Image (tube, helix red, strand yellow):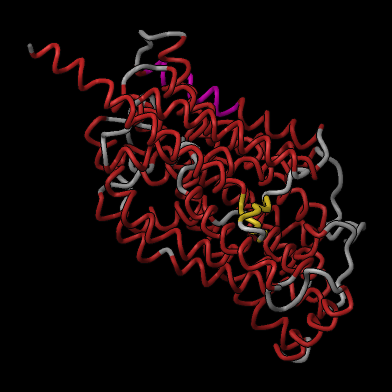
Amino acid sequence: MPTTLNVTALAVFLAFFALVTVIGFLASRWKSGDLNELHEWGLGGRQFGTLITWFLVGGDFYTAYTVIAVPALVYAVGAYGFFALPYTIIVYPFVFMVMPRLWKACHRGNHITAADYVQGEYGGKWFAAAIAVTGIVATMPYIALQLIGMQVVIKSMGVSGEIPLTVAFLILAFYTYASGIRAPAMIAFVKDIMIYIVVIVAVCMIPSKLGGYASVFDAAGSVFAQKGGATGLTLQPTQIFAYASLALGSALAAFMYPHTMTAILSSSSEKTIKKNAILLPAYSLLLGLIALMGYMAIAAGVKVSNNTEVVPALFAQLFPSWFIGFAAAAIAISALVPAAIMSIGAANLFTRNLWKPLVNPNITPKQESQNAKLISLVVKFGALIFIVVLPTKFAIDLQLLGGVWILQTLPAIVVTLYTRRMKLPALFIGWLVGIVLGTSLVFMQGLKPIYALSIGGQSYPIYIGLIALACNLLIASVLSFLLQLRAKPVALAAGR
């Protein structure tokens, strides 16, 4: 990575950053609504149509860390890094089937968060609070990872230190506070267009400079052959089960996160969500092309001390300064959009499902909105402190827990959409067991997401989130059944 200041790249970067800053502040006037109402500030008044939703969901699902981390993983281990590709293919049928039903239920009940929906279905406040805490905690390291992506591209232009990152997130914090979800929705248009340009140029130009795709794959294959172990252009037999379970578990978890849930609930109708589930796989094609940059970096002879620096180093080696600045701006803006939506989703959960029921039940709509705006600032600064104080590796490892945790909210949210046979105490206990088991297994594995189950003398490496979810569902189902059996004699006795 370059250590000298690239003035041209930095000037281009700052120009595009200034553009999105202006857009962020102007967004409050777009599709105008009373931003003193939480559903307007946090969900855009539930009026985003197909095109806006497509950019918004794409903006918070395909993030800066996606552009940085996926090629970095492919660069390090090869084919195993492509697990993100089937995961994004699996997720859209899930969205098509489940999310329109959830949107309808939330619209009918005027729910702003998934925890709102759970509370509306089962009553009480503590289980909904547990769902909210799970969402907030799982989101924090995710926001921190967006900062890592931005930190890497700023460093690639020869700018070091934490001050530039702090300034960037101060600006993000202020326009999110002012405009709510309208800001990332507008900026997502710019972000996606820029990312598509960067990726299309990269996959067309880089191979031509390296002798074509055949040369790229030959070079990557040779390097992996020398490394040995579990690396290569194809999966090792021992990796297949882990690869498949990671893809499935990640797909089930993806739209349980507060930021993706917020984007879905801001849609204008069930049909909008279904159309987007059909259109969004276009991003999967983009993701596949992004992943190939890991192989291109190997073929280009890129050497980095930290794998997360692979993509910026590749661009710095093969492109002129002005395009380096453009690519850096595209990746940085890809951090701003999801970070804004994540902080809004977390703020909505805190306000609606922690502050309101547990601290101030008589809070007014205006106070709700004001509280959420302040919490969105706290969340951003918390993530910033997280990155500045703690080692980057710790943030990356902690994010692995996020998927394990957020999966434990799936029974209460998704299963409830299809059956009311689940009982609140059973769901609560199932959630608790899933959280404790998943967290324990991850720490036992040294913060790795895979655990090898031994069945019949055979070892099956499986994503820990799926193991914890299976136990969660089993316990919740069995306890619900037992509670139903216990309730029947009481009902018969009352009938007499």
- In the displayed structure, does residue 405 sit left or right of residue 223? left
Q: Where 85 falls versus 184 (above or below)?
A: below
Q: Residue at x 70, y 44 (%)?
A: 147
Q: Where 27 falls versus 365 (above or below)?
A: below
Residue in front for this viewpoint, 228 or 218: 228
Q: Position of residue 330 (x, y in %)?
A: 63, 59
Q: Residue furthest right?
A: 3
Asked if the magenta segment contains residue 124, the reply would be: no
Q: Position of residue 97 (x, y in %)?
A: 31, 55
Q: Label the magenta part by its dominant secondary structure.
A: helix
Q: Name which quarter of the figure residue 111 lies in.
A: top left
How many marks are shown on the rendered structure? 0
Q: Where 49 falls versus 379 (above or below)?
A: below
Q: Position of residue 240 (x, y in %)?
A: 63, 68
Check the picture and name the quadrant holding the C terminus: top left
Asked if residue 353 shows in the view, the reply is yes
Q: Residue at x 35, y 8 (%)?
A: 362
- In the displayed structure, does residue 306 sit left or right of residue 466? right
The magenta segment is 366-377
Q: Residue at x 46, y 9 (%)?
A: 359
